[in-house]
Amino acid sequence: MPSYTVTVATGSQWFAGTDDYVYLSLEGTSGCSERHLLDKPFYNDFERGAVDSYDVTVEEDLGEIQLIKIEKRKYWYQDDWYLKYITVKTPVGDYLEFPCYRWITDEKEIVLRDGRAKLPRDDKTQILKQHRRKELETRQKMYRWKEWHPGFPLSIDAHCHSDLPRDIQFDNEKGIDFILNYSKAMENLYVNRFMHMFQSSWSDFADFERIFVRISNTISEYVMQHWKEDFMFGYQFLNGCNPVLIRKCTEIPKKLPVTMDMVECSLERNLTLEEEVKQGNIFIVDYELLDGVDANKTDPCTIQYLAAPICLLYKNLENKIVPIAIQLGQKPGPDNPIFLPSDATYDWLLAKIWVRSSDFHIHQTVTHLLRTHLVSEVFSIAMFRQLPAVHPLFKLLVPHMRFTIAINTKAREQLICECGLFDKANATGGGGHVQMVQKAMKDLTYSSLCFPEEIKAKGMDSKEDIPYYYYRDDGIKVWEAVKSFAEDVIHIYYESDEVVCEDVELQAFVKDIYVYGMRGVKASGFPKAIRTREKLAEYLTVIIFTTSAQHAAVNFGQYDWCSWIPNAPPTMRRPPPTEKGTVTIEQIVESLPDRGRSCWHLGAVWALSQFQDNELFLGMYPDEHFVEKPVKEAMAKFRKNLDEIVNAITERNKNKKLPYYYLSPDRIPNSVAV
């Protein structure tokens, strides 16, 4: 009688093994096997990290094995099991791989197909078509869209982390408990003795060092030492943790009535301001989005303030970007002066602090939350709803969706919810952050997520004109490497544009993102359908780059750039100055966050800057969803390209006081998971 050798691999996570009854049956083109008992209580098979083999004997040959059915029956208590994969050796010696990489929970049956990726048109038999359809029907019931706030991209329908499907939950929920992690961070930083000292001001700038020096590093120390300097202020617009706002100024806006007399002493080329603009030496950052946003009112004992500044910057003869004018409100007038480097020292310093505080708010809520976390969740939900596990694009994208829905759900549960941790220290807490996302949605366009397009649209693409923009330089290299990888995979499975058009699952995926993620807004520019291989490559690059590189660029530098509180105040406790010549050091310190808010802020930026345990970085794919040799060769080529980028960045950073490494592929996690 024919015999099949079945090998079963269990995950290595904690509690991945099971002691339940496990049954297996094989389904082939010529027949089905009986249900075979592989494991039962106290057999000690399927333990954590184990690989177990069994012989399955059948009465007659089953033909080509198409499906494997795994059934788990509870013995005593719920005992979830993480199944990595199953391999089958046929009677003629062929090996078949059946990837799973899923949790098997409760008493249910799961059905696996072999690991060869298939488009809908590749399935010829009714049994495979039916399996494909049933998988998506089941997933669409589990992964439901829900509106968290009006105008937001839709998110997952789950109130808390434990409501999520087991497959997308964190292995250890305690590891991503924001309250626990923030408290632990403050304990590790030895600042927990200050954390309840709300309304208690620091005595001076040096006093902030009491909560700073415990885990100092190269960049954060450099920031502490040089934060007052105009060079450091300007440098952060290029290579800090929010390097996405600066744009070349093509015309001085009427709402910023800067004159030549005001800035003449800052210009170094003997040109007028208008001529400097024409030559491309003037840049602008406008925080208009903050205009009209309500400041945090959750603490009646502390009035908090927001501003919507406009900052004009200049490229000097050393090619450094420095500020030359700051207006702290959007409407010009006698009570909204334009602050200049030639003003009194504390006037100019406080104006810059207000810009840095506004930059922090835009960074946290728009650059970070909306444009990486919420957008990546849209991609994740649409993928699970519309792409079955056998689809090549599911296999390509699933590593880049790891834990994204889980981290966002936990954030809505603890961090950005009403009375959440975000309210404790941030001036945009208490609802301001919700208003900001709603306003920012109009600028969330498809082209703005295409990295090279967005850089060019801001006039920041010339390396010759702007030589020290490492965010741009490294980002374009990573974008091109990801795009090349996406193209290689696409050409393996899509032989023509016509095949792209005919892929109904791909089209449903794209439509889900447009209709639910972008709320069907035509002005977003998100495609409703994909018609060519070239457009598909770009679309997949947007997804992979956003979920990996873009998030890394704006997330993991938060401790570096924001731990020195005066450089990134999360709130301001005095209103913006309305006249010049009155600012004192005491007024500045009274404006900055109190001791309690400073400590919560420091704990937050430290916790958010940490990689996950067992982090998987770009190009690392330990879960072998793909089994075909051409795709594995494409992966190897991708890793080689990424290694070359790492080497180039490492070489450039040698001996730099301010190294830029956030877009080095060995520091880019595959997915948004923190």
Image: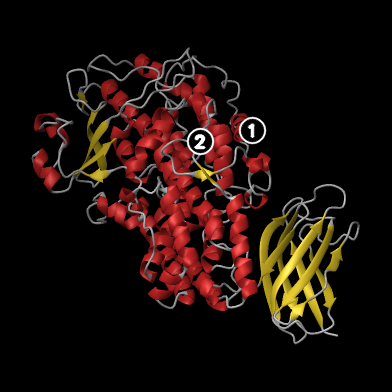
**Which badge, 2 or 1, comes first in the chain's sequence?**
1
Q: Residue furthest right?
A: 42
Q: Would residue 664 be found to the left or right of residue 53 on screen? A: left
Amino acid carrying mark 2 in the image: Val
Q: Which residue is mark 1?
A: 180
Secondary structure under badge 1? helix
Q: Residue at x 50, y 64 (%)?
A: 505
Quarter occupied by residue 97:
bottom right
Disc on res. 334: none
Q: Where is mark 2, residue-wise?
A: 605
x, y percent for residue 316: 20, 43
Classify 10 Å Cα crowding around label 2: few (below 14), some (14-19), many (20 and above). many
Q: CA distance from mark 2 to mark 1?
A: 14 Å
Towards the viewer: 641 or 492? 492
Residue 605 makes an appearance in the image: yes
Toward the top, the furthest residue is 301
| Residue 295 image point, x, y percent | 40, 23
Locate residue 488 relative to residue 33 in the image: left or right. Answer: left
